[in-house]
Image (tube, coloured by chain):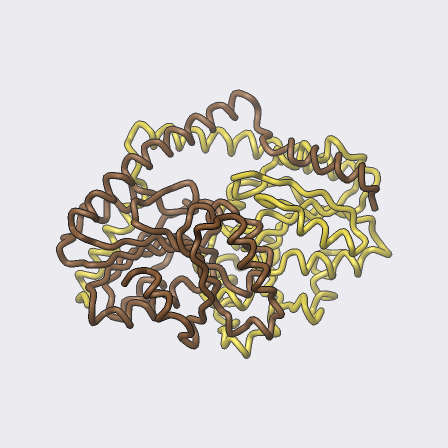
Chain colours: A yellow, B brown
Amino acid sequence: MLEKDEKEIHRIREIESTNLARDEIRDLVIETKKEVERENDALAEQINNIFKQHKIISFDIVGAIGAGKTALLEKISEMISQKYRVLVICGDITTRVDADRIERHNAETIQINTGRECALNAYHIYQIINNKDLTNYDVIFIENVGNLICPSDFFLGTDKRVVVVSTTEGEWVVEKHPMLFKMSDIAVINKIDLRERLGTNVEKMINDAKKINPNITILTTSAKSGQNIDKLIKYLGL
Amino acid sequence: MLEKDEKEIHRIREIESTNLARDEIRDLVIETKKEVERENDALAEQINNIFKQHKIISFDIVGAIGAGKTALLEKISEMISQKYRVLVICGDITTRVDADRIERHNAETIQINTGRECALNAYHIYQIINNKDLTNYDVIFIENVGNLICPSDFFLGTDKRVVVVSTTEGEWVVEKHPMLFKMSDIAVINKIDLRERLGTNVEKMINDAKKINPNITILTTSAKSGQNIDKLIKYLGL
């Protein structure tokens, strides 16, 4: 094992190794990314205006595969369907498993297959809403591709972003993904029913989230048992 | 709810909506990606040659956050440490939690923090191995960034790729991520000890993996109880 100082040198060398591509390509990559983000943000603003014109309340739901985004949306759709007309836009690399699941719970759904893209972007959403009569909906949920990293690069134009993690992802999951917690309004820690079985330190997750984003609203839920779903709906303002 | 034909039209429209950026930007994005991949693959080949020259056996371990990659590497490192000198290179957006965990199990570790990048690439690895005396190692594991999508874009030059999923990610996880299963040699379905509690259809996961890649070796494990870790080590050829 290494001594402390030597470890520190390692650490610094490791951090320095972040950007490694050949110079010319690195510049091209950075420029391309900037260009894409600029375009995306402009379009996201347009989308938000369109939603507002139609008095639609909108949410971007992000989180890793298996966090329980679909299960939460099944419960929420079911519970608010008497009050609101709901559209859920689901993003996945392939399949329409999630849309089919949610559709059984009184929401209309549309599935976007992103191919190899690891997040939805504003272009996806813009295309969809241009092909839909938005007077038919009161609430739009966008279930992003299962991923805790890429969605932070693309705003979709929704009113709020909700990040979902679960007790099965380990207590380091928040600390390891600061970007999405910084850029979200509500953090849901799901699968709270498994907490004791797994021994997950949920307090650490909550504290990490607060440290990263003091303004974030944090809630523990179980989509399986339904625990705190009513609270979540309240926090969504629905 | 929609009628069947109308649903099919929706589905087609959804698939067509895959690539949505403005034409000029889309071309730039595609060209940049191609260029980066070309460079990456050439470097990956160099890395593999360097590993071979040093008779190092190497693995790229991919999987989502919480699948149990780190826990598996803790067990494996411990069990093979009498026979092999092990280096584990861990990739994460931020923190060195994983490297610190594994280091307690008789492996040397190095942590790469990728900043906002959702996968390790060959440049990361090339930089690391150029700063290391490779005569000190027999086996190198690379624990990729927790993500089931992006790592498929970047070969790292290892002999084999191992994809890790877990029962907590739901039975659709394989079907939803065909790329990494196509491009891996071994598929590990971890957290098998939670199968009954969660009611996960593990047979579906196994069948999906076989359908996507008939040549893939599939194994169920529990990093927690140690179940089948000896088998996994055998399958790795160690």
Quadrant where the image shows the N terminus of chain A: bottom left
Q: Nearer the viewer, residue B202 or B144?
A: B202
| Rendered residue at 35%/52% (across/down) | B60
Describe residue A75's horizontal placement relative to residue B169 as left or right: right
In the rendered image, the quadrant that contains the C terminus of chain A is bottom right
Residue occupying the far front of the picture = B214
Residue extending furthest toward the bottom: A196
Q: In this orientation, does residue B85 appear?
A: yes
User: Going 55% across and 79% down the picture, which residue do you hit?
Assistant: A196
What is the number of callouts on the image?
0
**Closer to the camera, A3 or B41?**
B41
Q: Residue at x 35, y 56 (%)?
A: B143
Q: Is residue B33 above or below residue B180?
A: above
Rendering coords of residue B62 (x, y %): 41, 54
For the residue pair B202 and A161, the one nearer the viewer reads as B202
- For this orientation, the residue located farthest to the right is A82
Whole-percent x, y for residue B233 in the image: 33, 65
Q: Is residue B128 left or right of residue A105?
A: left
Q: Quarter of the image holding residue A93? A: top right
Would you say residue B101 is visible in this rendering?
A: no
B206 sits left or right of A222 in the view: left
Q: Looking at the picture, how far across and down is residue B150, in whole percent?
A: 45, 45
Image spot of residue B65 (x, y percent): 47, 58
Position of B196 compared to B107: left or right?
Answer: right
User: Where is A67 relative to A88, above or below?
Assistant: below
In the image, residue A206 sits, relative to residue A40, either above or below, namely below
Most extreme residue toward the top, as rendered?
A: B24
